[in-house]
Amino acid sequence: NALGNIYREHDPQLPLNLIFFDDGLSRTLTPGESMALMDFARTHRPKCPGRTAMVGRSDLSYGTFRMAEGLGGDFSDHIQVFRSLEEAKAWIASGESTFGVA
């Protein structure tokens, strides 16, 4: 999949910031797809600086992302869920996670 390619081809010396945006307009992710995306981002993300924001504008996608976030443990340093794209961009810009960096 495309996310797998991004992760595999990324230089671990460089920051990797991603925003996944489910606008709820053209096609909303199913709960299963939202859970799978969050799980994949959490388990396959390269060990490098950066943050991943999940944006769910519909109640369903936001709630599913939040549920997946809660089930996955504490990854709040590098993966967070937001209701708006503006909030996600602000969080990405506010700092840099050191996920997996010694």
Image (spheres, rainbow, N blue to C red):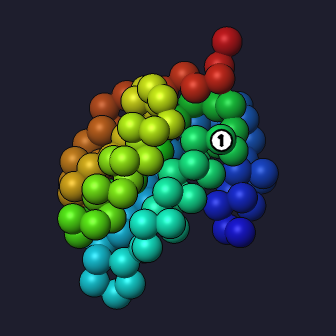
Residue pushed farthest right? Answer: 8
Query: Is residue 96 visible in this depiction of the protein?
Result: no
Relative image position of residue 75 (x, y in whole percent):
47, 30
Looking at the rendering, in which quadrant would you find the N terminus? bottom right
Q: Is residue 26 above or below residue 23?
A: below
Quarter of the image with the C terminus is top right
List x then y, in percent, for residue 59: 21, 65
Most extreme residue toward the bottom, as rendered? 26
The correct choice, above or below, for 11 with respect to 84 in the image is above
Q: Give whichever of 44, 47 is nearer the camera.
A: 44
Quadrant in the rendering for residue 92: top left
* Camera-side residue of 40 and 14: 40
* Residue drawn at the location 65% of the way across and 41% of the way down: 43
Task: Tell me the residue that label 1 is attached to.
Answer: 43
- Report crowding for label 1: few under 14, some 14 to 19, many 20 or more residues within 10 A (C-alpha): few
Label 1 secondary element: helix
Query: Which amino acid lies under the numbered mark 1 shown in the image of this protein?
Result: Thr
Numbered circles on residues, count: 1
x and y, in percent, of residue 37 in the image: 54, 58
Q: Is residue 69 shown to the viewer in this render?
A: yes
Q: Position of residue 49 (x, y in %)?
A: 57, 30
Write the residue at 37% across / 65% down: 21
Residue at 46%, 62% in the rendered image: 34
Q: Is residue 29 left or right of residue 99?
A: left
Residue 46 lies left or right of residue 37; in this view the side is right
Name the image quarter holding residue 63.
bottom left
Q: Residue at x 72, y 35 (%)?
A: 12
